Image (cartoon, coloured by chain):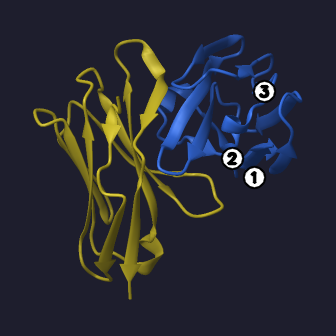
Amino acid sequence: DQQVKQNSPSLSVQEGRISILNCDYTNSMFDYFLWYKKYPAEGPTFLISISSIKDKNEDGRFTVFLNKSAKHLSLHIVPSQPGDSAVYFCAASQQLSGSQGNLIFGKGTKLSVKP
Amino acid sequence: EAQVTQNPRYLITVTGKKLTVTCSQNMNHEYMSWYRQDPGLGLRQIYYSMNVEVTDKGDVPEGYKVSRKEKRNFPLILESPSPNQTSLYFCASSSAGLLYNEQFFGPGTRLTVL
């Protein structure tokens, strides 16, 4: 059973508008969440993270929101740019339970930002 | 230049022929990990290592082995490859203290097992 779910395989957004990528998780022991971005033919690159003690973390155009009660997180990109077109992976881990090394990824959402 | 290198980048092999994919990092990172990426399945962790001589299974360890004899190297070994191990493999590393914030990924190794 998937512990981290990204239910939208793809998302298309107009340049300048907001992109919202969603992620759900089932394991209530997850306490640290990350977003990675991946271009074709390259390895993933870290984008932004959030600890379960927070509900929001912001870095420039990127904001991650965490709703623990709903076991849901989202990545907002504002404004979206064509260079943001990539596959975005949500990931989760259990930092406090001794399983820090085990990182669980979602299947990814392919974002296309149209000029 | 800080980087994670993987070799080979592309490999076509046959069922049962042992192979090793090397991974090396020059950032003195404690943590290293192997992932495979498959269409429709995203990234799945195979093995990880928190430090030298410390390795643990990820989500899909069957059919793989790893070793961590030195801090900079974390080879992935397929003793008897099978076609279902055809995939795109990524190695990654990070400083354990940064909790993956700066997890650097290698460029990937595309493996085909016939």
Q: Distance between the residues labelled 1 and 2?
A: 13 Å
* Residue indicated by mark 3: B78
Residue B108: image location, x then y, percent? 70, 49
Contact (Cβ within 8 Å) of mark 3 with mark 2: no
Query: Residue A82 vs residue A80: left or right?
Result: right
Query: Residue A17 vs residue B112: left or right?
Result: left
Which quarter of the picture shows residue B80?
A: top right
Q: Which of marks 3 and 2 is in front?
A: 3
- The total number of labels drawn is 3
Contact (Cβ within 8 Å) of mark 1 with mark 2: no
**Chain letter of disc 2 in the image:** B
Mark 1 vs mark 2: tell me if same chain.
yes
Mark 1 or mark 2: name the one nearer the start of the chain: 1
Vertical side of B79 occupied by A11: above or below? below
Colour assignment, chain B: blue
Residue type highlighted by circle 3: Leu
Crowd tier of the residue under label 1, counting other residues whose Cα lies within 10 Å: few below 14, some 14–19, many 20 or above: few
Q: Which mark is residue B106?
A: 2
Query: Residue A38 vs residue B83: left or right?
Result: left
* Residue indicated by mark 1: B1
**Chain letter of disc 1 in the image:** B
